[in-house]
Image (cartoon, grey):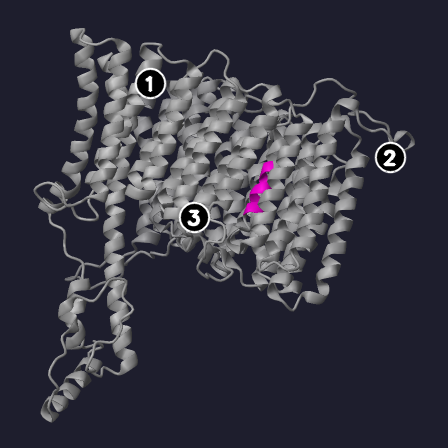
Amino acid sequence: MEAIFIILGLILLGPAVLAIWSLVVTNRLEREVKALTSKVELLTYQVETGGAQTETTPEAPLHEEVPAAAEEVPPEPSMEADDDADAATADAELSDEVEVEPVHAAAMAAAAPQRTGFEQKLTASWLVWLGGVAIALAGVFLVKYASDQGLLGPATRTSLGFVLGLALTCGGEWVRRNPKHGLAKIAPGSYVPQAVTAAGLFMAFASVFAAYGLYELLAPLVAFAALAAIALAAFALSLLQGPFVALLGLIGGLATPALVSTDAPAALGLFSYVAMIVGACLAVVRYQRWWWLAFAAIGGGAVWAFLWLTIEHTPRDVFVTGVYLIVLAAMSLLFWWRYELPERGVNWIAEIRGATMPELAGWVGAIAVAVLMPGLVQFSDQSFASLTFVAVLCGLYGWFARRVQSMDGLVVIAGIVVLFVITVWQLPTTGQQFDDFPLPGGWRFLGPVLDNDLVPFASTAFIFGALFAVGGFFSLWQAKRPEVWAGISAAVPIGLLVLSYLRIQDRVPDVNWSVLALIIAGIATSAARALVAHRDNPRMANAFALYAAAAVAGLSFAATMMFDRAVLTVALSIQLPALAWIAHKAGTPLLRWIAGIVAGVVLARLALNWNVLDYPLGRDIGSNWILYGYGIPAVMFYWAARQFRELRDDHVVTLLEGGTMLFATLLVSLEIRTLVEGKLAAERYSLFEQSLQTISWLIIALSRMWSHAVTPRFTKLWGARILICLSLAQIVFLQLLVSNPIMTGDPVGVYPVVNVLLSAYALPGILLLASVWWLEAIGFAIFKRPIQLLSFLLIFVYITLEVQRGFQGSVLSGDPQSDAEFYAYSLAWLGFALALLALGIYRGAPMLRYASLGVLLIAVLKVFLFDMADLTGLLRVASFLGLGLCLVGIGYVYQRFVFPHAEAPDDQPAEPSEPDAQPT
């Protein structure tokens, strides 16, 4: 029993303690604001009167009375004093300071807020509230002591606890009305009455709950009514004593349904009670302007709706739950109706930054109900009643948005609710499929194209689309932000069409989707034509551009819904050049945001959607959806980027240029995968495919590096960097290590030179050498030497493995199988070293000569460490003889062409000439 009382106390008093802290801070800020307001009004009066001193103190527009010290009339100043005052005034004006008149100095000093010390805070507020908590717990423990000692029965104990709580409550109100009692005077703003009243309400609340939950002395209905009465009494007392009492009543009132349980919970009783508690609290909030308390009330009401929907809701409760959600939304929006809002212009950013507490509370309630409404539809099995409540909610949001400018975003929330309802709609799994529906001779144009079980879904989408299209168009004419209404009028029908298509496309012939898209395009075109004459108004021009964009979207969907699902994304990309053209002609920047959103959807759909791997492919590389699924978006992104570049919109251009490069790269990579494996979802990633991907990435990177050197662009720079890094990572970790044919045993091809080894090692090495020239252009100069070394290594590996393939065939074992093969490695390496040396001397490139010496060193080590022991007969002789001749010849070449000695006198040695240091 003790644990139950302690837990109950923590539940009820924990949030209250937090509220006390926020209340103290709020009161302190209000006092400071009032004092600052008084100062400003005093200074304003001085400026208006020119600083003249009068015989009497003028009426200052202060919130508080001017102290007596401010009413004393100063003596009349002399002429010298006036001169000195003028000079002082001039000095004050030069230093941008306003000199305060002596007549008002005392008043300002009195109005200035006194800094509250720690001792005053401790004794005036913290200790008072701690004492109130102690009093409440003392009453609980007194009842417990009587119970432990067997002094009183359960009925007597709970009755005495309730009477004691009632006495403390009345005592708190008596102290508030009679502050001059006791040893000291109680200040008007003291927390003592609130603390005593809160302690009494807590004890009364705990006593009623104990009588019901612990001793079963009260029936559920009686206990419920008693606890509700205590909560309402707290609201009433808060009007006299302060917001903490109201917070305590709200917490107790909302906790009552959880504390007083019943075997047969009813939605009507629960939501009627919660609505009464929330409404009473909001009424107190509006009357006293304790706006922070509105968040707790609205949040508590939304939590109860969520708990009921997820735990106890049944389809027969749809009417009660729906009415409650509408009432909660209405109370959230209307409790501050006709509250004067500051003027913040028509910019949404300014509206958000300057939002007041009542507006924020309204947004919280509107969003909470909007989140819960789709759940009501789903848990009610998409009944007609639940859909009616969705329509009522959309009407409420639209009505309020039309009358309060700062809340016109509510109509956007209403549109999102409808789209989400269609998204989570539970469709039946039966019905006729139309995957192989015949061509024109068998089309069912506008006949019975829907199964009966799809009629509710399609009808709902159609009705809501029509309501938003018509309602948004007629609401935009007198609105301060007509683009909001035009946007929702154009976007919701298209969104409903796309969602419906994605969900039931297999059960409706494609031609019907095209007809619907054409109808939407026609309606949007008509709306745009109606706005043409008003394009001089920038905001009406934005509305015109939105309808024009909707018409373009409808036409693109109509043209592409005849094909498979991959083309739906293509339809979105086709809109980008059209949006750019409309933005250029209409002269409105709004479409750049729409273009950015469309581009982001296309990028996410094609670059981040792993489901594309399961899309069926055509028979060959030129007939599958990849060619147009990525090729057309790449072209559309490039075209739109060029048009937006003329508008100097760098952010959208960067996004579109990045999409162009991404789609082009994906197009090449996916076509390579289709060519090699035959399907995108293949688990195998062979060395041949890796090599083709690397070559394609390096070629694209080289083109971007060259283009960036000519015309610097952000996307070219980072595109080249990313592709270079991807290529290097794949070469090192996959092609050289994991997928090396010596490690895997995979065949490399039967043809000499032209085989997998050429594409895996030789060609990437050559392309890496070519990229060295442009590394400085992309800021990768630090990687110049490592990339050169990697390119030489790749060519060296290719020569080595090609020699091994010539002796061993298509499958490489890794070990030489004959002395001739072992000797051939030395010849190949020496030949490679001589070729690098010749090229280095011809080009004057020291790096090539250094690479030549490195390969030569490998050949020397092989001959002396391996050929001496492994080779026999003439091959051993030829190995050493060939190595010796090469070393001597290389020494001669270096002396003749690299470090030639100039003729010098006999007494002076010749100085070697400096080698040409021209880089590769």
- Asked if one can make out residue 457 in the rendered structure from this viewpoint, the answer is yes
Point out residue 37 in the picture as x, y percentages from the top left corner: 28, 64
Can you tell which of label 3 and label 1 is closer to the viewer?
1
What amino acid type is highlighted by mark number 2? Phe
The secondary structure type at the circle numbered 1 is: helix
Q: Is residue 646 magenta?
A: no
Can you tell which of label 2 and label 1 is closer to the viewer?
1
Quadrant of the image containing the N terminus: top left
Point out residue 30 in the picture as x, y percentages from the top left corner: 27, 53
What amino acid type is highlighted by mark number 1? Phe
Q: Earlier in the sequence, mark 2 or mark 1?
A: 1
Instruction: Tell which of 506 and 806 is nearer to you.
Output: 506
Point out residue 217 in the picture as x, y percentages from the top left corner: 35, 11
Q: Is residue 448 above or below residue 833?
A: above
The secondary structure type at the circle numbered 3 is: helix
Residue assigned mark 3: 358
Residue assigned mark 2: 445
The main secondary structure of the magenta stretch is helix
Q: The magenta stretch spans which residues? A: 410-417
Residue assigned mark 1: 209
Q: Is residue 451 above or below residue 914?
A: above
Instruction: Tell which of 844 and 114 is nearer to you.
Output: 114
Q: Residues within 10 Å of mark 2 (few under 14, many from 20)?
A: few
Residues at badges 3 and 1 in contact (C-beta under 8 Å)?
no
- Residue drawn at (26%, 13%), measured in percent from left and top? 156
Q: In whole angstroms, how far apart are the C-alphas of marks 2 and 1?
A: 67 Å
